[in-house]
């Protein structure tokens, strides 16, 4: 590995939008960083102003289903409803449909991925888990990310406070220091589409 070649990181946020998303957007804006938000359709319907802000500030929006089910338990028609209703809701708000999809819980197999691809979408996983969904301290979240860092890191975090995750205060509180650490260690921040072009697909 060339130690002098660039290191890239893509921050991604799942399960939103929620009121916590405002704080995350503020932090990203202050640091001039673009991220990728995998949004739940039912939450997008509740918080259209947040979806509009995510889009207007240049972040990428992906599809995280309408109601956050384990898609490995769904029929193809149920999956189509979950994904297409979310795409329709997002298109209604910002004028474009997402072409990125992330399965809730990362629960996706080859057959389901093939169906997603058939609908013109790319399935996105991650290679660094912040574990903010199970940790209740900002420091623990930071440690998980730092321990998992790779040369090209696609990090999963959560801005949504439903679906078993609970409050997102520690996610918000961990973000500034994480960004500072990544900047200090010469990581360049990119979105998932850029990550797929520059680094690789996960």
Image (cartoon, helix red, strand yellow):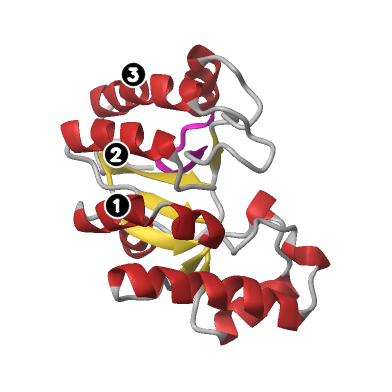
Marks 1,2: beta carbons within 8 A:
yes
Residue 146 seen by the camera: no
The prevailing secondary structure element of the residues shown in magenta is strand
Q: Nearer the viewer, residue 150 or 64?
A: 64
Q: CA distance from mark 2 to mark 3?
A: 15 Å
Residue 138 % position (x, y) = 48, 16
Q: Secondary structure at mark 2?
A: helix
> Left or right of 80: which side holds 175?
left
Q: How many marks?
A: 3
Q: Which residue is mark 1?
A: 54
Q: CA distance from mark 3 to mark 1?
A: 22 Å
- Ranked by sequence position, the earlier of labels 2 and 3 is 2
Q: Nearer the viewer, residue 103 or 17?
A: 17
Start-end of magenta stretch: 148-158
Q: Nearer the viewer, mark 3 or mark 1?
A: 1
- Ranked by sequence position, the earlier of labels 3 and 1 is 1
* 150 in the magenta segment: yes
Q: Nearer the viewer, residue 121 or 136?
A: 136
> Left or right of 64: which side holds 109?
right
- The quarter of the image holding the N terminus is top left
Q: Which residue is mark 3?
A: 177
């Amino acid at each position: 590995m060339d130690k002098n070649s660039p290191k890239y990181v893509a921050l991604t946020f799942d399960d939103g939008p929620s009121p916590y998303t405002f704080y995350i957007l503020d932090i990203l804006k202050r640091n001039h960083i673009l991220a990728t938000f995998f949004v739940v359709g039912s939450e997008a319907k509740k918080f259209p102003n947040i979806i509009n802000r995510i889009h207007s500030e240049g972040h990428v929006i992906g599809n995280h289903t309408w109601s956050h089910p384990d898609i490995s338990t769904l029929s193809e028609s149920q999956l189509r409803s979950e994904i297409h209703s979310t795409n329709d809701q997002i298109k209604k708000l910002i004028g474009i449909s997402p072409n990125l999809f992330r399965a809730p819980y990362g629960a996706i197999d080859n057959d389901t991925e093939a169906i997603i691809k058939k609908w013109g979408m790319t399935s996105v996983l991650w290679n660094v888990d912040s574990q903010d969904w199970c940790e209740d301290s900002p420091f623990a979240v930071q440690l998980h990310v730092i321990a998992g860092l790779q040369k090209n890191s696609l990090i999963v975090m959560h801005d949504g406070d439903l679906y078993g995750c609970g409050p997102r205060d520690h996610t918000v509180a961990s973000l500034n220091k994480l960004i500072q650490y990544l900047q200090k260690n010469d990581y360049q921040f990119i979105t998932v589409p850029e990550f797929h072009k520059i680094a690789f697909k996960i």
